[in-house]
Image: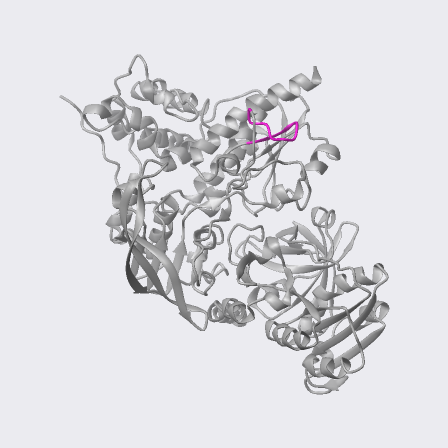
Amino acid sequence: MKVPRTKMPVLDKVIRRTNFEEVACGYSLAEAQLEASRCLDCKNPRCIAACPVSVNIPKFIKELIAGDLNQAYYSIYDDNILPSICGRVCPQEKQCEGACIVGIKGEPVSIGALERFLGDYSLENNILEERIITDNGIKVGVVGSGPAGLANAAEMRKMGYTVDVFEALHEFGGVLKYGIPDFRLPKDIVTTEINRLKDMGVNFHKNVVIGKSITIDQLLNEEGYESLFLGSGAGLPSPLGVPGENLSGIYYANEFLTRVNLMKSFKFPLYSTPVRIGDKVAVVGGGNVAMDAARTAKRLGAKEVFILYRRDMDSLPARLEEIHHAIEEDIDFRLLSNPIEFTGDNYQLKQVKCEIMELGEEDSSGRRRPMPTNAFITYDIDSCIISIGNKPNPILKDSTAKLAVDKWGRIVTENHQTSIPGVFAGGDVVSGAATVILAMGAGKDTSIEMDKYIKSKQG
Amino acid sequence: MYKIIEKRALNIDVDLMVVVAPLVAKNAKPGHFIILRVNEVGERIPLTIVDINGDNVSIIYQKLGYSTKLLGELVVGDDILDFVGPLGKAAHIRDVKSVLGIAGGVGAAPLLPQLKEYKKRGIKVDLVIGARNKDYIILLDEYRKICDNIHIATDDGSLGTKGFVTDVLTELYKTEKYEHTIAIGPLVMMKFVVLLNKKYNLSTDVSLNPIMIDGTGMCGNCRVTIGGKTFFACIDGPDFPGEEVNFDELMTRQDYYKEEEHVCNLKLVKK
């Protein structure tokens, strides 16, 4: 008989609206092994090809079924240094699980949940493969400690390089710390995963803004770095560009989420950074960040939280799981609504005016283009969180004359190398805002090119 | 960790602190600022760099809000948990023959490095400085070293002219001509200085200090409307042409967390 997909236990949908506990609770060993048993162990595993870091999925699943949890974990860690994180935040339905053969006639194997199970098992039991690293004494620098930088740092370290990671903020992890909320990714997991890189010998430096505290030229010419990896991400909020956007009460998602996640304002006044959103909160956008913002607003006590999105439900770019969780948590979806103006009283936000949209022809992204209808609706709100995407931060570009970027501010690369020899880049700063796993894949792939570059230079 | 090697009170509310921070000092220029966090539960707060000496960075702060009061409790030998910079754009030093600095209260601190830079380039520097009373007029000795003329205003008349800096300016403009001014102080002061200067066709650079978190262009909290366009004070500023600044909007944004500030201050009282 066919085994149905094993559902992961989740926190009660009403209780969880009042706390920041992780919503998805993870599998037990029995649940994990039952779910693993659904894998067909295909001859041509499409899941591996669909994974941006090519995790050998059938291999770790077989080892999990056999009960060799340590080996199963090592099999993942070879390709993915952050399994506990990726198991939680990857859009699996578009990657491994989307390619899973079992999914053609039924529901795919819950690969993400299995990865998470093994990652958590290793963190809880402190399982780590012994790895002997032979130092080669060559210095490389990594700019940014988000997913791209971490993946790059780990790979470079494994090859024996002396790796210095520079982070502008006071904590390491980039978007994993400031962006993704605790109820989706508990911060102690991020810290523990990063500590593993420290144990591996990667050096981490906080409070260093490359381009300000020290420039790329200074790192190369004065500090003796043979090569650099730029993984500074996409951290500059995109504006809506409508009147009234600077009224008090309007946040960019970056600010709102940073206040809550990095500065822990949900524990105000114990933590002294406040956040205030009032009762009625509009969130503009339909991606993961918008879902995170809406669900966070609910947990902070907002009575009415709604998403304003200019396309329809099927077009929401967020992960399916996040959309489901948001609906369960009573987030209202006001679709085909395009904010066109904010109005206020003495510069304090009061209302958002939206144009009702309808879907027209498909655009270049393959989605149907939202078209204006000249019909409008206005909502009374206390605050608004704009979550329509991010662009790369301009500090590196502004401080490095020779660094080529495109018209969106993204660093231009060829074979992962920028316009400056020896300086490589990957992740959101190259691709524009994408996912954790794509950034990790880029960081990992780039390490191979950096190694080649350094070796060729040394002849 | 960033060690405090010197601390002295400039008045009952304002301290000068010297902190060892080599990577802040390395590339710092007049107009740059830092962000610091006193402890694990602390806010990130921006402060202008007042002076650089080798690896040492001087800051001046007014113990007005919760976090600056917390900072003020630290003593020489203590460490500040986080201290990052130099942030922002360095001040744009204009090619002029004479410049007038206009300082209000603790705004005298961020103004000093800019005027020093003008003086260094051989430009004539005058100062109008105002505060509520004579105790709140700070850095006068430092300014005496670089300014040809200093005019003082206090609200209560305890030093200099009784009144606001705008009163002194109105008198001054009857006899003196300047090519350019830099005004740094409370938003309301900068707003009225700009209004006055406009009447005299006199340009005014202002330095803005909106609420910030990361200070590197990431959060957008510090956005200001300049000439109808949005700028981030942390990466595009903090200095802007005063004529273009929407001060009223910024004042509302600045006051957004006033109640929460009060809650935090109560925490200090209870301690």
In-image side of A262 versus A375 (left or right)? right
Residue A411 vs A453, above or below: the answer is: below
Residue B68 vs A111, above or below: the answer is: below
User: Residue A410 versus residue A452: which sits nearer the camera?
Assistant: A410
- What's the magenta region? A415-425
Q: Is the magenta stretch mostly helix, strand or loop?
A: loop
In-image side of A316 versus B102 (left or right)? left
Magenta stretch holds residue A95: no
User: Residue A47 versus residue B82: which sits nearer the camera?
Assistant: A47
Residue visible at 84% across and 59% down in the picture: B120
Q: Which colour scheme is used?
A: one colour
Magenta stretch holds residue A422: yes
Estimate the x, y position of residue B36 in percent, counting from the top left: 61, 55
Estimate the x, y position of residue A201 in percent, counting from the top left: 59, 30
Give the quadrant of the C terminus of chain A.
top right
Name the image quarter holding residue A211: top right
Residue visible at 34% across and 58% down in the picture: A282
Name the image quarter holding residue A120: top left
Estimate the x, y position of residue A290 in percent, counting from the top left: 37, 49
In-image side of A170 versus A458 (left or right)? left
Estimate the x, y position of residue A247 in percent, counting from the top left: 45, 65
Residue visible at 79% across and 50% down in the picture: B54
| Residue B52 seen by the camera | yes
